[in-house]
Image (spheres, rainbow, N blue to C red):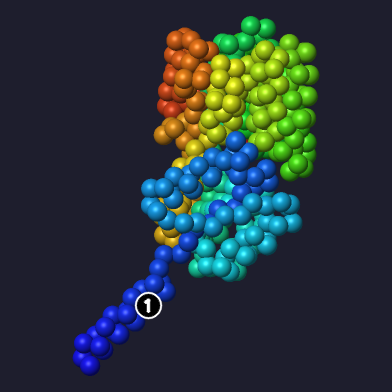
Amino acid sequence: MTLMKTILASAATLGLMAGVAAAEPALIFDLGGKFDKSFNEAAYTGAERWKAETGGTYKELEMQSEAQREQALRRLAQAGANPIVMTGFAFGETLNKIAPDYPDTKFVIIDEQVDQPNVQSNKFNEGEGSYLAGVMAAMASKTGTVGFIGGMDVPLIHKFECGYRQGFKAVKPDGKVVINYTGTTPAAWNDPVKGGELAKAQKSQGADVIYAAAGGTGIGVLQAAADEGILSIGVDSNQNHLHPGKVLTSVVKRVDNAVFDAFTAGEAVEPGLKVWGVAGDGVAVAMDENNAPLVTPEMTAAVDDAKAKITSGEIVVHDYATDNTCPVD
C-alpha cells in the first residue's frame, strides 16, 4: 500500500505540474494574411523558427475583417494563450481597451505603442532602413527619377517614404521621387492589381526604381516593375527572390526576431517599449545572391558608410510619426 500511495502521489504531482505547464503562445496576423510575402509573413517566419527550435506549438488566427480584432484578442485570452502577439498598428486601440481585462495575460504588439502594464510594444525605425534603400535607388537610377508606392496612407508608411526620400536626395539632391498611396482603408494592403497599375504609371513619369511599402499590394508593384524592365525595392521580408536580378534590394524589418523573442520569453515577456533600428540590424537592406548582380562595390560602400553614420548619430533620419513633416519637402 505504501508503494501504491507513492505512485498515486507521484501521479497527482505530475498531473498538477501538467496543469500549470507553460501556456501556449499565439499570433494574430493583420489583414492580408500570413502568406503576404511581406509583413505578416515575416511574423510567421519568426513563429515557425521558434517552433522548429523548441518543439513548441502555438495558436494562430488570420483576420478577415476589421470587426474581428477585439473578438480575436478576447478569444485567445480566454483560451489561455500567453503571450498573444499581434501584427500591425491597427490593433493599438483595441488592445488598449481590452488589455486591462486580462491582467495575467501578456500581449505583444508590433508597429504600435500601447502603454499598459501587460503589453510589450515593438516599434521599428523603418525610416533608417528606407534611407539606405534611397541611397541605393539613387545610385542605381539612370533617369534620376525614382518612385515610392505606399499602402494605406498613414504616418507609419510616411516614415518609409520620408527616409527613402532623404537617402535618395543625399545622393541626388536634384533628383525626383514620384509618390503614390494605394488607399486610405486597410484594403490598401491587399490590392496587387492597383499596385501594378501605379508602378506602370510611375514608369511613364520616368521612374526606373520603385520602392513598395504596401504589404500584399507591393507584390503587384514588384511584378509590374519586372515586366516593365525597371527595378523595384521590396519591404519587410526579403523579397529579392521573387524576381531575381530585378529587385534592387528589400528593406527588411526583423519582425521575425520580435515574434521569436516574444515566444521565447513566454509568460515572462517584459512589458514596455522595444525599438529596432539599423544599429543591431533591427532594420536592414537585404544583400544576397538574387540582387548581387545589381549591387556595385560603390553602392555597398555607400550603404555601409550611411549605416555607420546613422548608428553614430552623424546622420539623423527623420521620424515622420513624431513630426508629420519631411525635411526634404
Residue 106 spot, x, y in % from top left: 50, 61
Packing grade of label 1 (10 A; few <14, some 14-19, many >=20) is few
**In the displayed structure image, the side of residue 39 where residue 46 appears, left or right:** left
Q: Nearer the viewer, residue 186 or 156?
A: 186
**In the displayed structure image, the side of residue 223 where residue 12 appears, left or right:** left
Q: Is residue 249 above or below residue 124?
A: above
Residue pushed farthest bottom? 1
Image quadrant occupied by the C terminus: top right
**In the displayed structure image, the side of residue 283 where residue 207 appears, left or right:** right
Residue 141 spot, x, y in % from top left: 62, 10
For mark 1, give the secondary structure: helix
**Total marks drawn?**
1
Q: Nearer the viewer, residue 168 or 288?
A: 288
- The amino acid type, in three-letter code, at marker 1 is Leu
Residue pushed farthest left? 2
Mark 1 lies on residue: 16
Q: Nearer the viewer, residue 81 or 211?
A: 81
Q: Residue at x 58, y 11 (%)?
A: 140
Q: Residue at x 50, y 56 (%)?
A: 58
**In the displayed structure image, the side of residue 53 where residue 147 appears, left or right:** right
Image quadrant occupied by the N terminus: bottom left
Q: Residue at x 75, y 35 (%)?
A: 191
Residue 80 spot, x, y in % from top left: 52, 67
Q: Is residue 119 visible?
A: no
Q: Is residue 202 visible?
A: yes
Residue 15 spot, x, y in % from top left: 37, 77
